[in-house]
């Protein structure tokens, strides 16, 4: 999991430690992580991927459906294996190091194996906080609640209702999203 139960306890202020409470908190965190991954368009945990890229672009860059690409293990263009030392990994794409070589235009003509995502200790805080916020909202909705919170001011008090629309919790992730795959 990206966010731990200890982080969830601290963030939510709910320190209930019965076995069933820990199981429920784990389920909330896993569900929130799935929601965030779905919104981003990729799983942010560091892992190896192998993708058949639908088509080359005719340029030096080849965009992939993940972020924080750290290494390219194998690259096949058409039927030819490419030496991976000729390719540099960037945030959301790979590119040829020299300026002359390009990824040829074609259909399903490129297969790439690469490592992308973040180690849990290096995960961007915006991802961790989004997961914690969504999981905390789920926790507040248990038992039939609808996520009511209140705030008292000098002249009156207000009640805020949070429904299961996670959009406002996901918006800070917009700069990390993968669109178009």
Image (cartoon, rainbow, N blue to C red):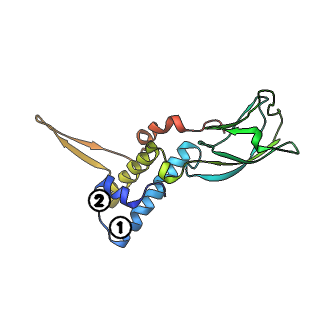
* Location of residue 97 with respect to 75 vertically, above or below: above
Give SS at disc 1. helix
The reply to whether residue 145 is in sight is no
Q: CA distance from mark 2 to mark 1?
A: 10 Å
Residue reaching furthest bottom? Answer: 19
* Residue at the image position 33 percent from the left and 58 percent from the top: 9
Q: Quadrant of the C terminus?
A: top right
- Could you tell whether 155 is left or right of 41 in the image? left
* Residue at the image position 45 percent from the left and 41 percent from the top: 170
Residue reaching furthest left? Answer: 154
Sequence-wise, which precedes: disc 2 or disc 1?
Answer: 2
User: Can you give x and y, in whole percent of width and height, for residue 7 in the image?
Assistant: 37, 56
User: Can you give x and y, in whole percent of width and height, for residue 83 in the image?
Assistant: 80, 44
The reply to whether residue 25 is in sight is yes
Residue reaching furthest right? Answer: 79
User: Can you give x and y, in whole percent of width and height, for residue 112 in the image?
Assistant: 75, 46
Quadrant of the image occupied by residue 130: top left
* Location of residue 29 with respect to 149 vertically, above or below: below
Q: Which mark is residue 138?
A: none
| Badge 2 vs badge 1, beta-carbon distance below 8 Å | yes
Quadrant of the image occupied by residue 172: top left
Residue position marked by numbered label 2 in the rendering: 14
* Location of residue 98 with respect to 37 vertically, above or below: above
> Between residues 12 and 77, which one lies in front from this camera angle?
77
- Could you tell whether 90 is left or right of 135 in the image? right
Number of numbered markers: 2
User: Can you give x and y, in whole percent of width and height, for residue 104 in the image?
Assistant: 83, 33
Q: How many C-alpha atoms fall within 10 Å of the one at disc 2: few (<14), some, or many (≥20)?
A: some
Residue position marked by numbered label 1 in the rendering: 21
> Between residues 66 and 149, which one lies in front from this camera angle?
66
């Amino acid at each position: 999991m990206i966010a731990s139960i200890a982080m969830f306890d601290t963030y939510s202020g709910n320190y209930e430690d019965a076995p069933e409470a820990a199981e429920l908190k784990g389920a909330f965190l896993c569900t929130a992580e799935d929601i965030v991954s779905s919104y981003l368009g990729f799983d942010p945990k560091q892992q190896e991927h192998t993708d058949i890229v639908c088509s080359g672009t005719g340029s030096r860059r080849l965009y992939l459906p993940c972020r924080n690409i750290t290494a390219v293990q194998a690259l096949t263009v058409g039927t030819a294996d490419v030496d991976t030392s000729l390719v540099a990994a960037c945030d959301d794409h790979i590119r040829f190091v020299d300026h002359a070589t390009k990824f040829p235009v074609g259909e399903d003509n490129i297969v790439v194996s690469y490592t992308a995502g973040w180690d849990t200790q290096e995960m961007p805080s915006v991802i961790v906080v989004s997961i914690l916020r969504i999981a905390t909202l789920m926790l507040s909705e248990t038992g039939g609640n609808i996520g009511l919170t209140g705030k008292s001011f000098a002249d009156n008090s207000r009640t805020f209702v949070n429904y299961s629309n996670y959009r406002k919790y996901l918006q800070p992730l917009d700069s990390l999203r993968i669109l178009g795959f």
